Image: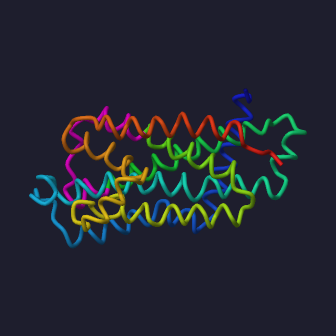
Amino acid sequence: MPSATALAKTTWMELKLFAREPAAAFFTLVLPVLLLVLNGSTNTNQPSAELGGAGTIDVLVPGYIALVIATLGLTNLPTVLATYRERGVLRRLQATPIQPATILIAQLLVQALVATIGLAVLVALGTTLFELRAPAAPAAVIGAYVVSVLGFTAFGFVLAAVLPTARTTSAVSFALYLPMIFLSGATWPREVLPQWAQRVGDALPLTYAVDAIKEPWIAGTSHVAALGLLLAMVVAGTTVSSRLFRWA
């Protein structure tokens, strides 16, 4: 295991590198906020029969939190790791006291930290500007959030492990990411999508992250099926990536 000092320094370095990438910061943190402001300005948070008695903002904010998680796990993480491999960064680390595993753990910590920043900003804006209601079951929401972060981080590790180049990784990541964010409820409530789109969304992992966070937030009950699928992603993704990940 890496030392605490090495891990802290590497995590801080990776966080600074993330902040220096305008596109990554925009899609991860700014875009969900813009979507909230735009949709919040044109929709009230009054209970809606179409949304099962929930308000539009109450449905949108859990989706935007899942959007932040998916952006990090599907587009940022695998591309960063594939780029490091292609440029020989991981290979060179094997010859230094900083173990390559330090990079992987640091990436996980960066994913969690940036996602938490995104969650905090969305909740703060939703509460102060658009009458977002407090979660009905806060502990269950936090649990679903943690499992979602771990699930999509494991997904990102798998992509980084099996795809050959940084360019291919970026292309495949976005090919997976774009349909997910539009059909999963991460950008707009699934309840208002056509039936065919909802059926497609049923097969997408991001749908389960949205549902896992949304159900305890609105109804106060855990979405057991969604949590089970996300935990399966954690286990399967960790197993596959640990066996297939290449350092060079």
Residue name at image x 57 percent, y 42 percent: 154
Q: Position of residue 52 (x, y in %)?
A: 13, 53
Q: Nearer the viewer, residue 142 or 186?
A: 186
Furthest residue in direction right, as rendered: 95
Residue name at image x 60 percent, y 63 percent: 172
Q: Position of residue 10 (x, y in %)?
A: 71, 42
Residue 222 sits above or below residue 72 on the image: above
Q: How are the colours assigned in the image?
A: rainbow
Horizontal side of residue 151 vs 186, given as left or right = right
Residue name at image x 66 percent, y 58 percent: 79
Q: Position of residue 179 (x, y in %)?
A: 44, 65
Magenta region includes residue 140: yes
Residue name at image x 62 percent, y 67 percent: 171
Quadrant (top left/top right/bottom left/bottom right) for the N terminus: top right
Q: Position of residue 121 (x, y in %)?
A: 39, 54
| Majority secondary structure of magenta residues | helix
> What number of labels is visible?
0
Q: Quadrant of residue 236?
A: top right
Horizontal side of residue 48 vs 203, given as left or right = left
Q: Quadrant of residue 20?
A: bottom right
Magenta region includes residue 137: yes
Q: Nearer the viewer, residue 48 or 162?
A: 162
Range covered by the magenta-colored residues? 125-145
